[in-house]
Amino acid sequence: MKFVALLIPFAILLSMVKGQLVPAMFIFGDSIVDVGNNNDLVTLVKANFPPYGRDFAHHEPTGRFCNGKLAIDIIAEGLGFTDHQPAYMSDKANGEMLLIGVNFASAASGYYNATAILYNTFSLSQQLENYKDYKNKLTAITGKSNTSSIISNGIHLISSGSSDLLQNYYINPLLFTSYTPNMFSDILIESYDNFIQNLYELGARRIGVTTLPPLGCLPAAITAFGHGSNQCVARLNNNAISFNNKLNHRSQRLKRRFSKLKLVVLDIYSALYTIITKPDENGFAEVRRACCGTGLLETSILCNQHSIGTCSNASQYVFWDSFHPTEAANKILATNLSNSGSSLIQP
């Protein structure tokens, strides 16, 4: 066993030999980046059944809320990974696969822990506990020194907040009668701040966090809050912009506090809004409706193989279901996010 232990500390060097720009990726957040952590949970919010995954490898559903690859998959490939980071709750998350990082994200989770409790999914707090558990497993494989190097040189990505608003605040009288959108976003920002500090204390040094997308332009949001209009809901978009401004401001403050922290805010709002408002220029024919079913409200279990009206060619659609982009849209988003986060891979 001793000669194996001597070889494994070269994991960082091995990542370079393999052509990876970073040794590992660690993903936290919601359904935009969930690759199957909800599959075995007793929850309505999962995507491990057709037609999800119909354009993915082997045409199999994996738990990704998409017809094919998520933006995070495409980003990983761009960084040189030949395998996608596995869902931490899956059987794939063991042995050598742990060396490239893992995905902790859980659909219907958010910065507000009660959101995940509402849907029986993994909150960010629980994802952080799973991350600690992962570190222990990695240490058992590689030793403390190499684990520290993988963690500090690896990229940590966070996508959260959308579910807190669309799947909780806007539809929960206990919240929207108690807090204004501005007050609620302040609560989310404090949770974000704590999460970043916790990650930093656990050794993370390179962190990318996505902004909220234009929530008012998602098909389900237009259906639910658009009062019969087919236009983006300005109120929801304005709330997202306000949150994003706070996210940027707080991130700058965190960078000033932790001098060794590389923290980059990845602007998914502008990238997705451009696709939605200029579909022709980006090769899309349909923006208002998603591909699955009627395209107006279906997501998760409502988007299934019996859904009537599901499109045959998802590449013409910006949205796969009423909340989530298609692989075609994710390719554009991944390019934008990779460009804006390029500083994370620099020494």
Image (cartoon, rainbow, N blue to C red):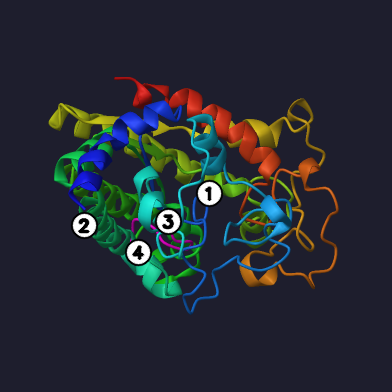
Q: Residue at x 38, y 32 (%)?
A: 15
Q: Is residue 78 left or right of residue 68?
A: left
Q: Earlier in the sequence, mark 3 or mark 1?
A: 3
In the picture, the disc for residue 123 is: 4
Secondary structure under badge 3?
loop
* Residue range of the region highlighted in magenta in the rendering: 106-112
In the picture, the disc for residue 236 is: 1
Residue 97 x, y percent position in the rendering: 41, 50
Q: Earlier in the sequence, mark 2 or mark 1?
A: 2
Please give the residue where the numbered disc 3 appears in the rendered image. 105
Q: Are marks 3 and 1 in contact (CB under 8 Å)?
A: no
Residue 117 x, y percent position in the rendering: 37, 73
Q: Residue at x 68, y 46 (%)?
A: 326
3D distance between C-alphas at marks 3 and 1: 24 Å
Mark 2 residue crowding within 10 angstroms, few (<14) / some (14–19) / many (20+): some
In front of the other: label 3 or label 2? Answer: 2
Q: Is residue 135 left or right of residue 154?
A: left
Q: Are marks 4 and 3 in contact (CB under 8 Å)?
A: no
Q: Residue at x 69, y 65 (%)?
A: 298
The type of residue carrying mark 2 is Asn
Q: Are marks 2 and 1 in contact (CB under 8 Å)?
A: no
Residue 5 x, y percent position in the rendering: 21, 46
The type of residue carrying mark 1 is Leu
Q: Nearer the viewer, residue 180 or 133?
A: 133
Please give the residue where the numbered disc 2 appears in the rendered image. 136
Magenta highlight: main SS? loop
3D distance between C-alphas at marks 2 and 1: 41 Å
